[in-house]
Amino acid sequence: MKSTKIISAAVMACSIASQAQLLEKYSALSKEELLSIGQPADRMDPKVRKFVNDHKSKKVVRKQVVKSDLLGRKGASKSASVKDSVVYMVNDAASERMRVRVGRLNRDILDVKGFRGEVRYDEKLKKNVYSFNGKEMSASEYEANVNKWKKNRDKKVKSFSLPVVKNLTAEEIEREFNSSDDVIITSVPQKETFSVTNYNGAPWYTPDEMWNANGLKTYGHNGGYNGQNVGVYFSDEGCANATYLGSSYQSLNCYYGVQSHATGVAHVLHSTAPNAKLYSIDWEDASGNNAYMVENPASYSPQIMVGSHSWGYYTGDNAYTIDDALLDQYVYSFRVSEFVAAGNKKASYADYWVTAMGRGINSITVGAARLDKQHYGSKYGYVLTDYSLYKNPDMNGHGDGTAKPEVVNFTNFWLRNSGSPQYFDGTSAATPFSAGMAAVLMSQRSEFKWNPELVKAQFIAAEGLEVVNADDIDYDDARFTAHIPSYKLFTESRSHILSWPGITQYEIFGTNNNGNDAYYTVTENVQKGKRYRAVIAWMVPPAPLFYDHVMPHDFDLAVYGAGLGYRGLQSQSLMNNFEVIDFVAKETGTANVRIINYRNDYSTAPLYLAYCFVRVD
């Protein structure tokens, strides 16, 4: 029987507290009631709608006198001033134009048969054991099977196009708008990059110091893992100075020329993942059209698997924008793991809302933290910078925030011998640092390639470096606090991974498919006093989220056993595509982790769901 439940947000999500607890945000409203509140989105943004409405009602009539009409006929006016001329009354409002973007969001759900992947650390063998559709195999065999699946899937992916900038009258805008239910028309945003060099005189640190702090050098680079065979692209204003990047860097277009911000992004990426192939794309082309995603990422060699965006724009609110939705569509279609800057606070900003495009639900949004530890109350540790934006977007229009950022990472890079800039900071630096870590991870563990939901789950599960002021700053409506991922937990946590890309709910949950009674149970061995984190993440087709303000898939998470009591622990948020439970086992034995298929609006369509269980300490 399908039960009604109270929303509780992600339980102590990535908190460094020793014990998770059930948090209830609402005491009366059920998920079903909340889902009915959302209103469908207007496919024309408010600025464009105002322009159209104003010009439909506005008439600016003036007299236009010409010597002859288009057929060359002379006028016949008896007025001396217009003798032998033709007089027209012209409505100037009808000819006024607005610069807009015209795009469309794909509503189709890609139907491709998927697989069940599993990677589990075997205590007896002291290594990871791989399984593809229930068959055990080596890591290289597993990768070959995934690559074969991805190649077949790519054949069915529809072409992806970004919005086109047009200069249109009100009548032309309405004509475009009415041509299809998929057409979206927006004003042209003012984009900005997110570095804040010399902000508050912050100290600077070399990449080596960053890597030592988060374990990347010890558990990644020292083992020979440097992003090899992984393509990473970044979008920015202009392109990077390639002097110190060599053959590892390729500019795909460079309308704005070499820029210091793009150069800073490239050098953080290159220093973090020195053997990855970097591609840059200018955020606009010569016509002013957006160009911030690489078309057909699988056509490059090596193939593009990671994206990084250290820019965005402020909208004056916390709404889910077309750019967020398009990036979500890109991730959903092409399986590229995307990292986006949360943005930096400016005096002109009214609030600390995460900027667009950092509101995308399938991407990973990154905040910035300082490497130098500081005292904060009774705590001493890393702190979120005072400019890093953290307030959540509102996907459904009634205050249920989507938890952003999901990740915080170090900033304030001293890029020695890299030309200009030598110093690079802000969320602009923390974002490529995170993207570079993902590239190194993919070169070390191939199961993360082409699996953005697993990358998101792993990054959240591995947040082992505490941000001591996170609970006071980033603990807003979604009850989620982001921390800094430890690379050690990427590789040394004896993790258990399950992945269901392209699998239907029937193949995961059986015939009992919706509500609290439809669940999949994973049994994990735990030790008394040890801390663990269970995370699920899934990809969302963005059309229903953008058009109808509804999450089409809603999974929940619960943990029972291990001395956690009758109710266990639960994570039941409404507008997130991940759930997380952080707990300390009270008994040695087994913990039963339950993945609950609470709601799925596309019952026969494929899901993209991943599970990650790690021992934190």
Image (cartoon, grey):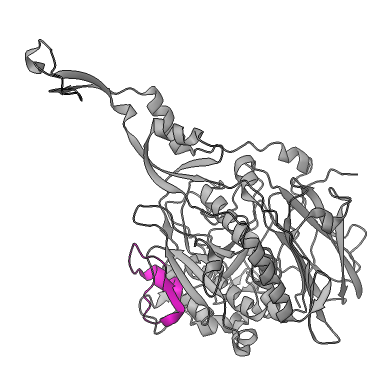
**In the rendered picture of this protein, how many numbered marks are placed on residues?**
0
Quadrant where the C terminus sits is bottom right
Q: Would residue 198 be visible to someone looking at this image?
A: no
Magenta residues span 240-266
Looking at the image, residue 326 lies above or below residue 226: above
Q: In the picture provided, is 95 more to the left or to the right than 180?
A: left
Name the residue rendered at 12%, 23% in the picture: 67
Residue 598 visible in the snapshot:
yes
Indicate whether 425 appears above or below 472.
below
Residue 363: in magenta span: no
Give the left or right position of residue 303, taking residue 493 as reference: left
Where is the N terminus found, in terms of image quarters?
top right
Q: Residue at x 83, y 74 (%)?
A: 135
Q: Quadrant of residue 538?
A: bottom right
- Residue 110, given in percent of the width and then of the height, sits at 66, 53
250 lies above or below 520: below
Q: Is residue 555 left or right of residue 384?
A: right
Asked which quadrant contains residue 405, the reply is bottom right
Picture coordinates of residue 8, whole percent (x, y): 77, 51
Residue 361, image x and y in percent? 62, 55
Side (left or right) of 585 relative to 580: right
Q: Position of residue 375 (x, y in %)?
A: 59, 73
Q: Residue furthest left?
A: 80
Q: Residue at x 34, y 69 (%)?
A: 258
In magenta segment, residue 251: yes
As rendered, which of 292 and 159 lies closer to the eye? Answer: 159
